[in-house]
Image (tube, helix red, strand yellow):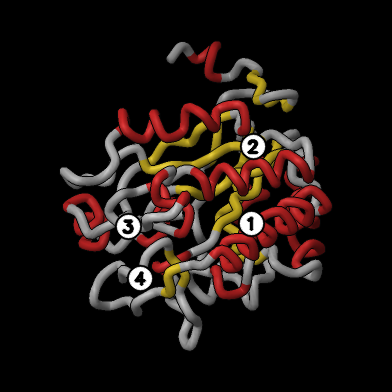
């Protein structure tokens, strides 16, 4: 890419970025009870000083039982707003825009004594518990959790939101035929759950919405870029940009490779 283009302004919806340098979300596993701390301040503000155009904060869980790890950020309580808002304010001082990734771990949660939720009662692998197949009330609650999390993110001063629908976490597991074996509306249209969440976010606020997805499951019976595009096409009016990643729904060669190099921060 021409360096002039790389450092030229770019817009997502009505959000103007000073350049096209975007920092991807990288989970730091350093929060305490969901609260951001000094580590997060150093991690994000240093990128703003480095003149990153858009900084995407690591995933913040929309519910306490939706954390991937006890060290995840949270946005499931109003009390989480203050610590995040301080970091956002500091990043803004250097001209960077900031987005918050929000998500739910689903069947890949690792918190002890916490029931896991999933579209179907299929565990990720032998190291994980068997999740509960979500009923309509569970789905309704998670949609509400995303909406409330988005409202809190706006109150914290974030300029955009990224909905985490990749890497085998809850929304991703609904999108994939490998983990979604439902026979109801949420199985016949695997994007319906994501659609309902995006619709609720659109109703609640006018921030730019980014959706992170896994374009391929690295499995012959899983999603491919073509099948995922077909799923997402009807939802395109509901989001402003796609953040395209891959894998994470089932054990696959790429996931085994990442585990081999012991790099947990790649999977936010």
Asked if residue 47 lies left or right of residue 113, the reply is right
Q: In terms of secondary structure, where does tag 2 sit?
A: strand
Residue position marked by numbered label 3 in the rendering: 181
Which numbered marker is on residue 35?
A: none
Determine the CA span between mark 2 and mark 3.
28 Å
Residue name at image x 63 percent, y 42 percent: 198
User: What residue is shown with label 1?
Assistant: 143
- Residue 200 position within the rendered picture, expressed as x and y whole percent measured from the top left: 70, 46
Task: Single out the mark in the foreground, 4 or 2.
Answer: 4
Mark nearer the N terminus (4 vs 2): 4
Residue 138 % position (x, y) = 57, 67
Mark-to-mark CA distance, 1 and 2: 15 Å
Between circles 3 and 1, the one closer to the viewer is 3
Q: Label 3, secondary structure: give it.
A: loop
Q: 191 or 39: which is nearer to us?
A: 191
Q: Which residue is mark 2?
A: 209
| 151 shown above or below 8 | below
Dot 4, crowdedness within 10 Å: few (<14), some or many (≥20)?
some
Asked if the residues shown at circle 4 and circle 2 are in contact, with their CB atoms under 8 angstroms apart, the answer is no
Labelled pair 1, 2 in contact (Cβ < 8 Å): no
Q: Where's residue 148, x and y in %? A: 74, 58
State the residue lying farthest toward the bottom. 113
Residue at which label 4 appears? 121
Q: Nearer the viewer, residue 217 or 138?
A: 138
């Amino acid at each position: 890419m021409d360096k002039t283009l790389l450092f030229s302004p770019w817009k997502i919806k009505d959000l103007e970025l000073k350049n096209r340098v975007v920092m991807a979300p990288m989970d730091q596993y350093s929060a305490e009870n969901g609260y951001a701390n000094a580590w997060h301040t150093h991690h994000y503000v240093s990128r703003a000083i480095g003149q990153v155009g858009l900084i995407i904060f690591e995933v913040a869980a929309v519910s306490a039982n939706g954390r991937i790890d006890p060290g995840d950020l949270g946005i499931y309580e109003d009390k989480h707003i203050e610590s995040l808002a301080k970091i956002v304010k500091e990043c803004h001082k250097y001209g960077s825009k900031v987005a918050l990734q929000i998500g739910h771990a689903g069947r890949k949660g690792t918190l002890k004594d916490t029931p896991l939720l999933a579209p179907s009662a299929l565990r990720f692998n032998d190291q994980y518990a068997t999740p509960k197949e979500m009923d309509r009330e569970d789905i309704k609650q998670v949609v509400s959790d995303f909406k409330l999390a988005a409202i809190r993110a706006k109150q914290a001063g974030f300029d955009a939101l990224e909905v985490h629908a990749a890497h085998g976490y809850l929304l991703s597991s609904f999108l994939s035929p490998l983990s979604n074996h439902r026979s109801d509306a949420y199985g016949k249209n695997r994007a319906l759950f994501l659609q309902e969440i995006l619709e609720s976010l659109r109703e609640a606020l006018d921030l730019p919405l980014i959706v992170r997805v896994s374009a391929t499951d690295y499995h012959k019976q899983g999603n491919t870029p073509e099948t995922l595009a077909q799923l997402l096409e009807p939802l395109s009016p509901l989001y402003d940009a796609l953040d395209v990643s891959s894998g994470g729904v089932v054990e696959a060669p790429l996931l085994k490779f990442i585990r081999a190099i012991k790099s947990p921060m790649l999977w936010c």
